[in-house]
Image (cartoon, grey):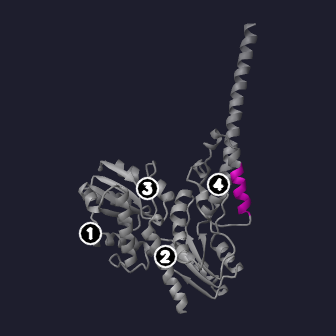
């Protein structure tokens, strides 16, 4: 009898273990399937399958249990792809409507999947441009297909890429087209934008690409322009106001340094960051420093900026993005909790009493919006001359 009881207990234990293993395997399989579908749309090229793939990825995610969602891991996939709350997508406007007039202003951005930032930063610029040009139709295009796919899959919102937006303009009979990039500088993204527009130039009576935010690049770190000065004044004013000081001088007296984090680039336009540093010095902004995620130029790398702030004697640091949009870089590379974020590294240096972050893009600052409006106006004037 005892032997029979022991046998039954052993079989029961094996059954429990088998069931547990089966459940773990099932959970892993479901999570891996969702991850593979996310990785399939984490691409920079739109194809005939993109819409179907976006739908499939979201459906696979929605079928997962909370435990399974936590297991999602792929080359680019993770639980945050669908699970992170980035704000209300309905606050934004994709601006992909037809019914375009003969005159169109196409506002082109890299894009962001952070809904709140997209509504405040990108849509904020677009609304300002539309308000200043009521007789023109303002539409949107993003250059990052990866981001377009993310938004479409997660929120069901479709945003045009460059080809889609330009094809829409042609289909709607647009005659005069002004393209306003929201990019910071004449970098790689701007070059790609110009190449995309050139393929469609013959389909319009006139086409003009307006200046990006910082205007012409210039030859070296000492060559600055009024655009860079306007941006420096606007972002520092916003940073000081947000941190509760009446002036930059008051912040300096309190031992506060502002670190403005840009993206960085290997493109020759990277000198723009050095020029922004020069502009800060010319404005006597002693406690304002410029850095970049990519660390290009070299003096803008995080460790170099930490040393510069430390050697200048400031004990309190406020990080803020020198980016049009407060998206992934601002939320993760700057303000994230991982050990490679700027917030973490500044704290880990042990040189500062406090490190705070202001997660706000340039696009939501009124003065910056008006600078884009001015660049659009300059492009419109060029069209009239021609």
Q: Nearer the viewer, residue 59 or 35?
A: 59
Between discs 3 and 1, the one toward the N terminus: 1
What residue sits 69% from the left and 52% below the top?
58
The residue wearing badge 2 is 373
The x, y position of residue 7, in whole percent, is 74, 15
Q: Quick one: SS at disc 2?
A: helix
Mark carried by residue 154:
4
Q: CA distance from mark 1 to mark 2?
A: 28 Å
The x, y position of residue 386, in whole percent, is 55, 92
Q: Quick one: SS at disc 1?
A: loop
How many neighbours does mark 4 have within 10 angstroms: few (below 14), some (14-19), or many (20 or more)? some
Between discs 4 and 1, the one toward the N terminus: 4
The image shows residue 15, relative to residue 149, as above or below, that is above
The x, y position of residue 196, in whole percent, is 61, 78
Magenta stretch contains residue 50: yes
Q: Nearer the viewer, mark 2 or mark 3?
A: 2
Q: CA distance from mark 3 to mark 1?
A: 25 Å
- Disc 2 and disc 3 in contact, CB within 8 angstroms: no
Magenta stretch contains residue 69: no
Between discs 4 and 3, the one toward the N terminus: 4
Can you see residue 212?
no
Mark carried by residue 334:
3
The magenta span reads 49-59
Q: CA distance from mark 4 to mark 1?
A: 45 Å
The residue wearing badge 1 is 284
Q: Quick one: SS at disc 4?
A: helix
């Amino acid at each position: 009898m005892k032997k029979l009881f022991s046998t039954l207990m052993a079989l029961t234990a094996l059954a429990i273990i088998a069931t547990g293993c089966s459940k773990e395997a099932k959970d892993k399989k479901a999570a891996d399937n969702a991850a593979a579908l996310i990785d399939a749309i984490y691409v920079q090229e739109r194809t005939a399958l993109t819409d179907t793939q976006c739908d499939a990825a979201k459906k696979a995610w929605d079928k997962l249990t909370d435990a399974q969602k936590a297991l999602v891991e792929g080359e680019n996939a993770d639980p945050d792809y669908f699970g992170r709350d980035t704000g209300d997508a309905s606050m934004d406007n994709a601006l992909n409507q037809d019914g375009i007039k003969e005159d169109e202003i196409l506002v082109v951005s890299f894009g962001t999947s952070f809904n709140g930032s997209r509504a405040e930063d990108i849509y904020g610029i677009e609304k300002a441009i539309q308000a200043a040009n009521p007789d023109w139709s303002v539409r949107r295009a993003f250059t990052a297909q990866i981001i377009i796919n993310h938004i479409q899959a997660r929120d069901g919102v479709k945003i045009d890429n460059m080809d889609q937006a330009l094809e829409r303009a042609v289909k709607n009979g647009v005659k005069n087209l002004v393209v306003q990039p929201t990019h910071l500088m004449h970098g790689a993204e701007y070059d790609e934008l110009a190449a995309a527009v050139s393929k469609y130039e013959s389909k319009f009576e006139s086409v003009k690409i307006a200046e990006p935010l910082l205007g012409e690049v210039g030859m070296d770190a000492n060559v600055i322009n009024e655009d860079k000065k306007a941006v420096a004044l606007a972002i520092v004013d916003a940073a000081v106001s947000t941190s509760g000081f009446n002036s930059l001088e008051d912040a300096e007296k309190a031992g506060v340094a502002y670190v403005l984090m840009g993206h960085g680039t290997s493109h020759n336009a990277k000198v723009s960051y050095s020029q922004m540093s020069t502009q800060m010095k010319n404005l006597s902004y002693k406690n304002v420093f410029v850095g970049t995620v990519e660390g290009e130029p070299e003096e803008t790398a995080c460790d170099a900026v930490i040393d510069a702030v430390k050697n200048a004697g400031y004990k309190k640091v406020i990080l803020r993005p020198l980016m049009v949009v407060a998206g992934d870089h601002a939320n993760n590379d700057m303000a994230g909790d991982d050990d490679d974020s700027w917030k973490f590294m500044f704290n880990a240096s042990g040189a500062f009493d406090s490190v705070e972050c202001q997660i706000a893009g340039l696009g939501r600052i009124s003065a910056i919006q008006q600078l884009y409006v001015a660049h659009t106006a300059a492009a419109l004037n060029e069209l009239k001359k021609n």
